[in-house]
Image (tube, rainbow, N blue to C red):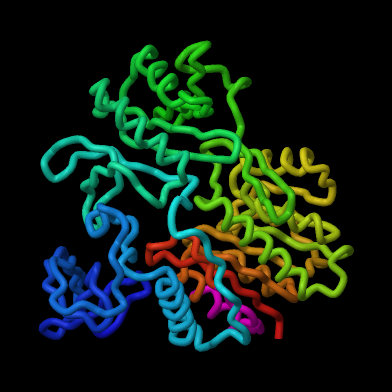
Amino acid sequence: MEGLTNEGRGIAYFEGKTVFIRGAYLGERARVRFVRADRNVLHAETESILELSPERVEPFCQHSGQCGGCDWQYLSQDRQIELKQQLVLELLAKFARCEPSQVLPPLMQSERSYRYRAKLAVWNNASGERVLGFRESEGKSVVAIECCPVLSLGNQRSQTLLQQWLASNKIIHRIDQVDLLETKERCAVVLTLNANVDESILKRLHELLNQESHLVDIWLSRKSKITYFNPVISAEGDPDTSPSYLLSLDHLELSLDFSPTDFIQANQSLNSKMVHQAVNLLASYVPNPKIAHVLDLFCGIGNFSLALARIFGAVTGVELSDSMVEKARANAIKSGIENASFVAENLQDNQAQRAWVSTDIQGVLLDPPRSGAKEILPLIEKLKVPVLVYVSCNPVTFVRDAAYLLDHGYKLDKFGLIDMFTHTHHSEVMASFVLA
């Protein structure tokens, strides 16, 4: 292999075409299987490694190489982080023509049992058998997973018991997806159904999950509607009695209520570190934070907003979802925070009114979806906001947006990697841009 893509695939060349190879690493020779072609690019899967890199380590999961999840488990965690940082910095140099003034130490986590939220697929495998697990690296087929060591311990337990329940009741054909969630107080299992499941069968699952003083809730999702299964009442439950869950920000002594349909980070401990670093980074550029007004764009349930409100004079959070804005407001009230306000608006709609815009904005925190923040950047540039802290889950759109900011008077000051998904090629980053 002569290089790596930003998605962590090996790069080789064949008959004048570039080949991207999953599972192959720098300096290795491999026997591969071509899976598809896109113009002058071929995509391939590694079948066997003919010459191994000395940097390879033995994967600890029996499903490594089949499951499409932990595609970098053959490298040490330190090497994974080094590569991720290097690949993003190379993208910045190539497409944004810049490098940061300072590279921050990466935010890291435990190598195992770190995923407090996970989504398992139910699909037919290559043999036509319907199984519960994670998708293959290529295609739609699902690899049956007996145990996933990167799931949190509570989620591992839920998955094991769920497998037992499915095997004994033969109803897997009625389930399309399973979401697992663990917080400090309780766990949840969300079943996405394509047909009704008898209430008595669901009650047996509830009894199985709640053995040994564990607290595990069951939610049912059908036709985009999610309901809490209360075994005491009925399969539909009572929305007024459904439980809520707490996202703990340990560094900041904050906790936020959320429901299973709300977006939160999969790794709660690393999320706490990320929020702590982002808030302090933004504050380090503002002369007098206690009287400053800042924006939290794509604020969700207030993950960054409430922490910002502890330091800054006023915070305005903006988010597309009305329900998440209501959650953010409720979380502010619960935390005794009075200097944070929230607005429901589509930040990716160029025709939106932007009634929340103020000329006194002294800082912005951006945490956009994978598509990035290109639609809102012209407004930030127009307002001449002195400093912007950008948290990104997609290096490609981050680099695109960085190029825009650099072309419109900003300088990339600090940059740091967030290793949210260890053993995968997935990179998250945090960066500060200051008006030059």
Q: Is residue 197 placed above or below 418 in the rendered structure?
A: above
Q: Is residue 384 visible?
A: no
- Quarter of the image with the N terminus is bottom left
- Residue drawn at the location 31% of the way across and 23% of the way down: 195
Q: 380 or 48, which lies in front?
A: 48
Q: Is residue 71 visible?
A: yes
Stretch of the chain drawn in magenta: 400-416
- Residue drawn at the location 56% of the way across and 33% of the way down: 186
Quarter of image, res 416: bottom right
Q: 412 or 200, which lies in front?
A: 200
Quarter of image, res 378: bottom right
What percent of the width, then of the height, locates residue 421?
Answer: 45, 60
Residue 48 located left or right of residue 209: left
What percent of the width, then of the height, locates residue 312?
Answer: 82, 61
Q: Say if the magenta span includes residue 358.
A: no
Residue 427 located left or right of residue 405: left
Q: 408 or 300, which lies in front?
A: 300
What percent of the width, then of the height, locates residue 203?
Answer: 41, 16
What percent of the width, then of the height, locates residue 223?
Answer: 40, 29
Q: Say if the magenta span includes residue 414.
A: yes
Residue 409 located left or right of residue 36: right
Q: How many marks?
A: 0
- Quarter of the image with the C terminus is bottom right
- Residue drawn at the location 31% of the way across and 77% of the way down: 55
Q: Is residue 127 placed above or below 317 in the rendered structure?
A: above
Q: Is residue 370 placed above or below 323 in the rendered structure?
A: below
